[in-house]
Image (spheres, helix red, strand yellow):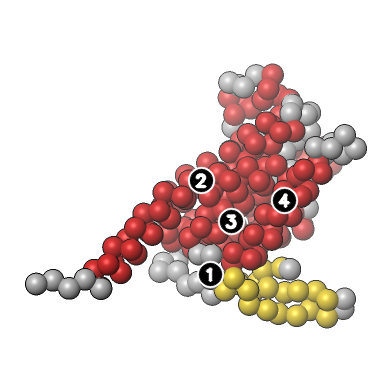
């Protein structure tokens, strides 16, 4: 099930979302321009390394990689999938939060995702990179704020692709369930190091939902107050 677009118009142009996508794409093309050794050095310097963080958690050189790692990707599919989800769901979260708060939200959930990865997976000497954790935070926020919004998805059935409109709660809920299943599998004794950082996805999602919960609660209170006013008679 691949989301293609949502039916959730925004009130303003999503400058931050577009800028984040552009920054990720430009960074990836820069990666492609490098020779193997130079690319290795780039990832070694700017991707997040859990072992280095645990060894020296106050090192500025390590702390900066919490952010820089979010703009590096391991391949076309990694980049394309992340940017597709960011484009579909990020613009509405930016619209709700506003540009500056959305930047803080995006970076904050990305950092929370990285910390969740370290907490579960430990101090592995394996670089962590990608925007997935921050985008998972966007999905957590979207699930709370726009659960009933219709999302157009492509469903591959053998050699046929069917298009369908399903609620965002189903699309995002299914995505999160897959992360949990894979995440639990990743901590089994038989699991190998490296691969997808499932717990970063889970941590980012939970952080995004947690940060957005007060906004959702306030919106629910406003709706209840508005309904109460509509059905109240004054004399």
Residue sticking out furthest to the left: 235
Q: Badge 1 is on which residue?
A: 148
Q: Quadrant of the C terminus?
A: bottom left
Instruction: Specify whether 28 is left or right of 57.
Output: right
Q: Residues within 10 Å of mark 2 (few under 14, many from 20)?
A: some
Which SS class for mark 2?
helix
Q: Is residue 192 visible?
A: no
Where residue 179 is drawn, which disc sits there? 4
Look at 63% across and 42% down and name the residue there: 203
Instruction: Specify whether 93 is left or right of 52.
Output: left
Q: Badge 3 is on which residue?
A: 139
The percent coordinates of residue 15 (x first, y second) are 47, 60
Q: Nearer the viewer, mark 3 or mark 2?
A: 2
Q: Dividing the picture into quarters, in which one does residue 88 lie?
A: bottom right
Between marks 1 and 4, how big is the CA–CA gap?
Answer: 21 Å
Give yes or no for contact between labels 3 and 2 (Cβ–Cβ under 8 Å).
no
- First of labels 3, 2 by sequence position: 3
The percent coordinates of residue 226 (x first, y second) are 28, 67
The percent coordinates of residue 228 (x first, y second) are 27, 67
Between marks 1 and 3, how big is the CA–CA gap?
Answer: 14 Å
How many numbered marks are there? 4
Q: Residues within 10 Å of mark 1 (few under 14, many from 20)?
A: few
Q: Badge 2 is on which residue?
A: 210
The residue lying toward the viewer, choosing from 154 and 188, is: 188
Between marks 3 and 2, how big is the CA–CA gap?
Answer: 12 Å
Give yes or no for contact between labels 4 and 2 (Cβ–Cβ under 8 Å).
no
Which SS class for mark 3?
helix
The percent coordinates of residue 132 (x first, y second) are 66, 49
Look at 50% across and 64% down and name the residue there: 146
Q: Quadrant of the N terminus?
A: bottom right
Between marks 4 and 2, how big is the CA–CA gap?
Answer: 18 Å
């Amino acid at each position: 099930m691949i989301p293609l677009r949502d039916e959730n118009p925004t009130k303003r142009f999503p400058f931050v979302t577009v800028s984040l996508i552009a920054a990720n794409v430009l960074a990836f093309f820069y990666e492609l321009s490098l020779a193997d050794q130079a690319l290795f050095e780039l990832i070694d310097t700017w991707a997040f390394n859990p072992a280095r963080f645990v060894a020296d958690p106050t090192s500025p050189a390590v702390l900066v990689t919490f952010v820089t790692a979010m703009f590096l990707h391991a391949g076309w599919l990694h980049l394309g999938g992340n940017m597709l989800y960011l484009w579909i769901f990020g613009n509405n979260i930016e619209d709700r939060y506003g540009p500056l708060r959305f930047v803080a939200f995006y970076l904050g959930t990305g950092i929370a995702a990285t910390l969740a990865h370290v907490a579960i997976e430990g101090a592995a000497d394996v670089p962590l990179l990608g925007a997935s954790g921050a985008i998972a935070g966007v999905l957590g926020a979207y699930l709370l704020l726009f659960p009933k919004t219709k999302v157009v998805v492509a469903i591959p059935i053998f050699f046929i692709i069917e298009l369908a409109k399903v609620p965002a709660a189903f699309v995002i809920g299914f995505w999160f369930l897959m992360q949990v299943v894979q995440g639990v599998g990743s901590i089994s004794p038989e699991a190998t190091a490296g691969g997808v950082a499932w717990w970063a996805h889970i941590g980012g999602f939970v952080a995004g939902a947690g940060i957005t919960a007060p906004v959702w609660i306030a919106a629910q209170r406003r709706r209840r107050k508005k309904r109460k006013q509509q059905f109240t008679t004054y004399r």
